[in-house]
Image (cartoon, rainbow, N blue to C red):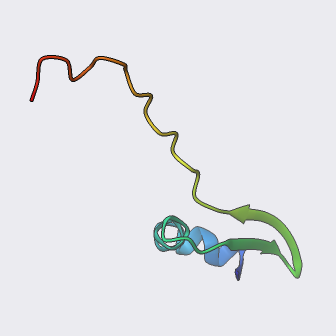
C-alpha cells in the first residue's frame, strides 16, 4: 500500500493509475488523514454464448 498526498496525486495521477492497474493499492491522504483509496476495478468476464462456435472446427 502506497500513501500519497492530494497534491502529489494531482501531479502524478497518470503514474498512480498505472500502478493501480498493476495491482498496487494507493491511498490518497489530506494531511495525515487517509481519504481515498485508488484501486483498479475488476473487469467483468464476457458471457459465453452457447452454440457460438457451431459449425466451426
Image side of residue 12 versus residue 51, left or right? right
Q: Number of labelled discs?
A: 0
Q: Residue furthest left?
A: 57
Q: Give how far across and how far down residue 2 sits, in percent.
A: 68, 82
Query: Residue 11 appears in which quarter of the rendering?
Result: bottom right
Q: Residue at x 88, y 82 (%)?
A: 32
Spot the residue most to the right: 33
- Residue 25 in which image quadrant: bottom right
- Which x, y percent locates residue 10? 60, 68
The percent coordinates of residue 19 (x first, y second) are 51, 74
Q: Residue at x 51, y 45 (%)?
A: 43
Is 5 situated left or right of 21 in this image? right
At x 85%, y 72%, the residue is: 34
State which quarter of the image contains the C terminus.
Answer: top left
Residue 44 shows up from this direction: yes
* Residue 6 appears in view: no
* Position in image of residue 45 (x %, y %): 47, 39
Looking at the image, is 30 positioned above or below residue 39? below
Tell me if 46 is positioned left or right of 2 in this view.
left
Amino acid at each position: 500500500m502506497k500513501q500519497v498526498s492530494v497534491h502529489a496525486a494531482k501531479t502524478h495521477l497518470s503514474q498512480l493509475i498505472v500502478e493501480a492497474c498493476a495491482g498496487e493499492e494507493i491511498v490518497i491522504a489530506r494531511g495525515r488523514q487517509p481519504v481515498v483509496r485508488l484501486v483498479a476495478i475488476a473487469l467483468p468476464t464476457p458471457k459465453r454464448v452457447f452454440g457460438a462456435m457451431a459449425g466451426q472446427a
